[in-house]
Amino acid sequence: MGNSYAGQLKSARFEEALHNSIEASLRCSSVVPRPIFSQLYLDPDQPPFLPEGNHENVKPKVEELDKELVHRYSQNGNLDFSTNQTVNEMEDEEEDEDMSDSSSPPIPYSQKPAPEGSCTTDGFCQAGKDLRLVSLCMEQIDIPAGFLLVGAKSPNLPEHILVCAVDKRFLPDDHGKNALLGFSGNCIGCGERGFRYFTEFSNHINLKLTTQPKKQKHLKYYLVRSSQGVLSKGPLICWKAASFAECRSRQSSAASLSAKPNSSVSPSTTPEGGSANGYKSGFTQTDSSVFSPAKSSSAVNLSGTQDPSRNKNIVKPLGLSVQLVGKAFSAAPLSLRATDVANAGRNNVLSSTASRPMPHSTSPSPGCAAGDQASMSSSGPPKKRHRGWSPGSPVPPPALAVPVPTIRPSARTEPLLSVPVPQSMLTGILQPQPIPAGETVIVPENLLNNSGVRPVILIGYGTLPYFYGNVGDIVVSPLLVNCYKIPQLENKDLDLLGLTSSQLLSVENMILLTIQYLVQLGPDQIPLREEFEQIMLKAMQEFTLRERSLQMSAQCISVSPGQLPWLARLIASVSRDLVHVVVTQNSLAEGISETLRSLNEMKHQQKLPDYVVAICASKIRGNEFCVVVLGQYQSRALAESMLTTSEFLKEISYELITGKVSFLASHFKNTSLGDDLDKLLEKMLQQRGESVIIPFNGDVSECVSSQEAIAMVSTQEPDLDVDTFQIYQPQLTVARKLLSQVCAIADSGNQSLDLGHFSKVDFIVIVPRSEVLVQQTLQRIRQSGVLVDLGLEDNGTAYQRAEKYVVRLDNEIQTKFEVFMRRVKQNPYTLFVLVHDNAHVDLTSAISSSLSHGEPSHGLADRVINCREVLEAFNLLVLQVSSFPYALQTQQSRISSSNEVHWIQFDTVDDAASEDKLYFGLNEYSKSLQWGVTSPLLRCDETFEKMVNTLLERYPRLHSMVIRCYLLIQQYSQALMALTTVASLRDHSTPETLSIMDDLITSPGKDKNGCGHMLVIRVPSVQLAMLAKERLQEVRDKLGLQYRFEILLGNPASELTVAKHFVMRLKAWRGYEQDDWIPRTYQDLEGLPCIVILTGKDPLGETFPRSLKYCDLRLIDSSYLTRTALEQEIGLACCYVSKEAIRGPIVALDLSEKEHEKANGSENDSDELLIDLDRPQSNSSAVTGTSGSLADNGVSSSSAADKSQKQAPSLNFQTVAHSSVDEGTYASFTAGETMKQECDSLGNQMASSTTSKLSSLSSVSQTFRWPAHSAKDSKALHAALPRIVILSKAAYCLLSSQKSGNLPSSSSLLPHADVSWLSSLRPLLHKDMNSEEQSLYYRQWTTARQHHADFSNQGEASGSRSFHPRRLLLTGPPQVGKTGSYLQFLRILFRMLIRLLEVDVYDEEEINANHTENSEITQSSNDHWPDIEIFSKMPFDLSVHDPKYRTISPVYTEQLSRVKQETSKETKSEEPKKRETMSMMLTKYAAYNTFHHCEQCHQYMDINPAAQISDSTLHAFTFSSSMLGEEVQLHFIIPKSKENHFVFSKQGKHLESMRLPLVSDKQNLNAVKSPIFTPSSGRHEHGLLNLYHAMEGISHLHLLVVKEYEMPLYRKYWPNHIMLVLPGMFNNAGVGAARFLIKELSYHNLELERNRLEELGVKRQCVWPFIVVMDDSCVLWNMHSVHEQSSQSLEPGGSGKNVSLKSVLQHIEATPKIVHYAILGVQKWNSRLNARKAKAPFSRCHVRDFILLNIDLTQNVQYDLNRYFCEDVDFNLRTNSSGLLICRFNNFSVMKKHIQVGGQKDFVVKPKIMVSDSLAPIMPLQYICAPDSEHTLLAAPSQFLLEKFLQHATYKLFPKAIHNFKNPVLAIDCYLNIGLEVAICYISSRPHSVNVSCEGVFFSGLLLYLCDSFVGADLLKRFRFLKGATLCVICQDRSSLRQTIVRLELEDEWQFRLRDEFQTANSSDDKPLYFLTGRHI
């Protein structure tokens, strides 16, 4: 141990460096790798290479780290060390340090035989005592002082730790130093002590080592007791100081990786097959600090590029750090490719460094979990070359797929999963360990060459042997391994699956199921993991059923090991020799070796089985098995499906670069007839000479000279479907769904989005790297006019400027994105929307991509979308748009499932009638196979597949895509030749290819203009695509077809290049004049006959023109075994088609009511929006120029006529009724204006210019008139047809095997290569799941892989995953119209923000202007305040001018009698006329409702979350009211913060009064004296009760007056407001009651305050007597000053100057001698106020809505308690007749908001006892009845019924008064509305009252309403009545009615009949009112 090898160079190290150097030089493109010796010797910081024994000269000390770690472990006793299990496996890496360096197999270490009769079982000592930690974890073990318990690892029991006691002097100290040489230990099992040699001790405990025993190697861990007393594995023993830092960093990285314990799975990162095989890990609560050190180091370790702890700075090939990303490919020709033993396309089990295959335990015994996740927390840099390599060549021949993992054997001694082991393992980090000789398989040399097959070994159950020799010729695939590792599920998941436990299948059952599955696979199918998992699940479910029925345990069903071999052979016997079973006794190695040997020696004509199932029926270890796949097609398909797309594309380019394809290329040099292709073409070229085939309008046999061909131009414009482009109903619906989701986010209460804050919308669209996609998106943005509509650009510049709104994810994005983020930061009031289109395309995380040295664009999306600035910007919404969102819907998704917006379903037949075009997508293609038509839409070219299979056998080393591509090129070339010259080749082209080419060549010939079809050939590899383009172009040109059709390369990285003469033709068709036009998108190629060879890893959502007829996907085969990969290829063909084209059951867009908006979470859904957005757009919108004509269809005012559009549609839009957000009613377009296109493929494909049907879209009716064309009209209109798709066999099988339901079977595949299944036991994805249900399914059952951008989104504890609150996901099938939808969304979002900043205020002219007398007395217009002397001399204007009251009875004045009656004749309509409103922008002084949030007023609005609602206190306040004649008890709810406004009794309990200021108080700028009362009903959300901004934030006293039953709602929404709660008896009362009680209470309070302050020496009259009574709809206040009008003429619509409520109140409160005024008010705003010539600054007239009321002066004037209507007119008339002053300030106006809910709304009058539900509405004339009659009694207050009746009964009650203002109706002491046609003369009965002069007036009627004692007979005798005038006397009950008639001596002059007595139609409990009518005699 003491020898130092510091100076020597260890051979292994030399070999490794040499190997790495060679590899690096092979890979490296530019950098020259460093020479090997300088690597080894000249590293500046290279420490001398130490063998493990030397502890000198080591790395710097790490005491602190160490102490911290130990401290952590000891502190957190409750932390089960299961998390740190990860560390052990990492440390195992050191184990091969001591092995022999040659590449020969290891020689087993010869141990002394065990003494006779002693126990030799693994895990037990020789005395037979159990040493396994599992069994001893609960035991109390006594150990001598100075000894420690440590764990030893036995190579035969990798899942167990053996417990030993060792003297701690022989163990290293904290820093990995100072261990004494030698050993001293005791056996814990039998108690034997004093072992002095580790060799002796290792024999005693049966370690059975194959190498020399060393304590450093086999004593692994300290063991510690947790707080529960459980003995468990602790930290590693750090034998080498150098490795200490490594242990540390690894432990921390492991901790960071496993920091999220999975609910059912272990804390390791493997979600699948994870946990200690399914035990609940003992990870109950973790102290998160344990993981904190992990954060810093995890990044480094994840990188794996250079392990910081081992300073071996060997320059190593960049591609080798792939283990991190789980990418399986390196570009160098290595036979052992750096792969996870294969991403089996889908299952990353582990990844190894390229130079050494890693072992991989697959046994599901406890503790060994190999997972689906390539979890590589540390594989470190490559170390020594593995012994498995053929010593001959340092660079073995290249392999197609993956390295073979070396697999540790593992003995299974206890029953599977019987003992819970508190440990878990990080997947696949098992390092090679010595292996007994019997467990190895030598792969025969030249296996692939001899047999033509590269066998694939599917890992089964048990451990695979160790492979060496020619390992490049075999592939090990973990495809099915996780199916056999059945996870432990939680009970809820078990119930979901219908199982009782997840341990139902024995190994024997699994083996039989596997064989059965292989037998039933067809000859052209490969095993699919998802299929097999479902078979296993079904089997378990059947066992569960059987178990339940037999009431016995499942074990009864298991097969005994003896029966297994013959049962297995029995099942295999039906396979026609395609499945063989090999059974061996000792190990799997025998079976595999046997299979490989026979394969190698087999003669070529022999038939191979497709599958060999090797079973090892071992007595000791139980049954193990694996499957060796030998089928030519199957083995290749499995091997290729293990590579990800990027990997196989690299593989292909590697094969092309290294010239491996030369054999294949030479094979295709000849035609199928054997002629030399090139020579044949040359010969044809010479025969043709100068002439070429006619470009169009002629047969293929016609030739013209090339000059003529170029000059040929179409004579007339074809009716191409170009550029017709608009928004369709489904797009509108989805845009609205998006908008309502944004509103839901804003309403959600987590303060993540404050829509009231923004006044503008800006956006950026991020698209993947595709030039065509960028151009396409730009085109849509330009055509939609969205930039102009959002006010971002003006009309002239929008076209050029559009480019800054679309950014491509390439290397320049960083700078462009920074500019965008700067804009976001600088414009806090703009809401930015970041649209991430095709969001599924690049999901690599930024970290992993920087390490994998992958494609440069990798991880860019993550850097942009998930960067901190984006996540934190409060004014940025992220909208991810995807057709294949599955990879964004994992357990770690950053998007909440409620923020997903799915395209509406296409499943109703009912709406089919309303659509011209129907969407034809993947599901429809799949269903179309059942139509039974002769030429199906989805086809599989069987002939082609047969040819491919023959070639695949001939060229086993080439990737099948290369072979398919070469064959495809040959097929198309030969078809071209066959159709033009060499007819004999017809039989050698497949019929499919021939018919496609025939159509392509002949269609331009039949067309006068040269229009034809497009064919898309999908060739994912760029190199192959370029090859195909060159070859096909060459053939085309030599055949003279270069003017007939074009061949284009569709490469995402470059723009389209089209030959000049074709561009000329395209321009001629479109009638474009400009020279510089070139086609930039595929849609620009509409009508051009062409072949597009579409290349690139993924199709990126480019839209193809209608003329696309064929999609050739024959190259898309078994490498595309994920749902996204396969479906996005088919997505190329999806489009909208004419209804006639669809056979079978029609499917249609669902526009039914069920797409109604979902509730938004707030009580009234999105009423706020409804109110604001459903209004018609006002004619003079004050907001933007465009809003008046922003059409629902997106046809915005910015549309300019475009000469390419020949049609002039006239649109007639109706507003869409059922939307939650509507864009308003819009100006109709005249026929002369062309319709502007609106966004997305929907537009291009639906708006066919040739369908002249009337398309009526659910609620938007549109009529298109197409101008008459010339002769073209005779031509049949061509319908839009679905494309024809030619698939490979593999893809065809996946898409066609749909039995029922809506989804093709491809939907059950793994959704995306970057995610993995969480568990092999999971329910099936139902065939009928819609996209919402699929999303929830994927969120439950898939998890992001380590290189996925969302992988990092895992909370410390599961369930705390953070969704980003401002991120939405829009999903919809490909080409359905998503772009149009999100552009429309931007537009309506802007509209809505403007609407949120706008308010509809009433804008109505004053009425009755002609009734007013011009007063002689006026004040000068410059006065700020009224002069009481002048003012008191002004007459009061009795007429009501408020436009709200245009339908009430006019008040009689002398002027009124002179008015011509005819003018007042109005058509009587039941429906009140809609009141005029106008939209105003809110200013900073507005009053707001609950929907407003901002930083300034949130304290005012929101209660502090810490404080509960109970912080406000309830106080009763009782006073006696003379009017009510009883005590009234009101309740105050006073928040703590507002208690300073009140006076409480000394004990602080009883409310005494509300504080009032003094009249004499100096005007304080920051105070308003008057308390503000706002009665409100039914408007808890919509009432404008937030006065914070209106009061400029100053403290003020504001009381809400609410009814008792509404109090909880108001209290919930306005917790910081003082509430005044009316007594319960007023719950049904009208507004009169609220005003009456406010006034009564205020007067009572004034008296109390006067008494209180009097004691303090204040005079009674000094207490401030005013209150403000204000409606809850007052929104803005304005000041109109004279100076403004003279200096600048304001146009109508200007609103004077907006001022705050505070300044208005302070101005009015400053009025001189204010106490002499009874009521002060302001006028109501209308838009014509400023335009009018200046009028008097003050008027003496009616005021309402917002008044300052002097409660002292008006003490004896009451509001009528019972009134529902006109209570303020009534009160004003009473006040004026009492001689009090009412003053209106005309320089101020108040704006009232139009609120649609609540307020003074009518009762719904219903019968008291409902007889039937469907009653006709009750008319007002039915509100009364004869007393005691059988009339239907109504459930409504009597006063309400009376007032409503009087409004409508004018003709019956007062016939003489109608339209007769000279003879009004006399009303004494009351004003009641008795109809518009009748004038009312108000007279007060009080003595000294001021009344209108009645000299010489004859009244046409008399109205006495609840008259009091002031009304006497002599008063009535003063008035004169017309003969036949009518009388109406109203009283509380029948007796007072009789008394009143007697008291007033009415019978003298009035005639009564018995039948003239009536009552309101109430029951007697509801106290009806009675009235009597009579005629004047």
Image (tube, grey):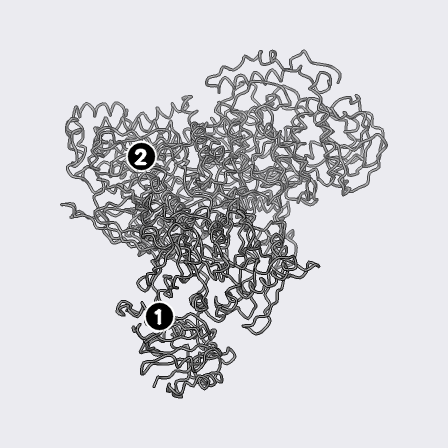
In this view, the residue in front, 112 or 1387, is 1387
- Which residue matches tag 2? 797
What residue is shown at x 51% (from left), y 44% (from top)? 1365
In this view, the residue in front, 582 or 882, is 882
Task: Give the x, y percent position of residue 1391.
Answer: 38, 47
Q: Secondary structure at mark 1?
A: loop
Please report whichever mark, 2 or 1, sits nearer to the chain's N-terminal start.
2
- Which residue matches tag 1? 1452
What is the spatial separation of the Cα atoms under label 2 and label 1, in whole angstroms? 63 Å
- Closer to viewer: mark 2 or mark 1: 1
Residue 545 lies, with reference to residue 1200, above or below; the image says below
Label 1 sits on what residue type?
A: Tyr
What residue is shown at x 39% (from left), y 64% (from top)? 1436
Left or right of residue 1095, residue 430 in this image: right
Q: Residues within 10 Å of mark 2 (few under 14, many from 20)?
A: few
Left or right of residue 1094, residue 1720 in this image: right
Task: Give the x, y percent position of residue 1535.
Answer: 61, 55
Q: Quadrant of residue 1176?
A: bottom left
- Indicate the quadrant containing the N terminus: top left, top right, bottom left or bottom right: top right
